[in-house]
Amino acid sequence: MLPTQARLRRRPEFTVVVRSGRRAGRPTMVLHYLPERPVVQAPGPQDPQVGPRAGFVVGKSVGNSVCRHRVTRQLRHLVRDELHRLPATADLVVRARPEAAGADAATLRRDLGRGLDRVLDRR
């Protein structure tokens, strides 16, 4: 499970990353990466934003509810192990493609690693 402070939760957070961030497409997923999260002036108490955050988009095209939740759990587990590679101010959105439903964990891990290498400019 990802810690609470490491999760993207609100729609505007996802929108900023998807529209403004770098993108890397892989066969089972698309990674959207924003190295510097914008400062949002919102009323109310603010949580201190420390450490990288990740969010997941797994649409109905991936499969039924059981399949979507399984893919989300797998991706969450894999991203948790890779968060250390991201800078403390980074946001990452992982959007699953329909091919993720039939992929095993090794394939998802490989695609995530290669996608991160690409958005982080590492060869």
Image: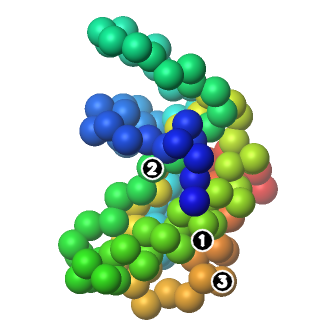
- Residue at position x 71%, y 60% from top? 81
On the picture, is 72 further left or further right than 24? Answer: left
Q: Depth check: 50 or 95 in front?
A: 50
Between the residue at mark 2 and the residue at mark 1, the CA separation in whole angstroms equals: 17 Å
Q: Amino acid at mark 2?
A: Gly
Question: Mark 3 = which residue?
Answer: 106
Left or right side of 120 for 17: left
Question: Residue visible at 37% across and 41% down?
Answer: 9
Label 2 or label 1, whichever comes before in sequence order? 2
- Nearest to N terminus: mark 1 or mark 3: 3
Name the spot of residue 27 as percent of width and height, x first: 48, 75
* Quadrant of the drawing holding the C terminus: bottom right
The residue lying at 46 percent from left, 37 percent from top is 21
Q: Which residue is mark 1?
A: 111
Q: Amino acid at mark 1?
A: Asp
- Helix, strand or loop at label 1? It is helix
> Of circles 1 and 3, which is in front?
3
**Residue 61, x across and y down, in percent:** 23, 75
> In the structure shown, which secondary structural element does the residue marked by tag 3 occupy?
helix
Q: How many numbered discs, if any?
A: 3
Within the image, what quadrant is residue 13 found in? Answer: top left
Quarter placement of the N terminus:
bottom right
Q: Which mark is residue 55?
A: 2
**Residue, x 37% and y 74% (percent of image)?**
69
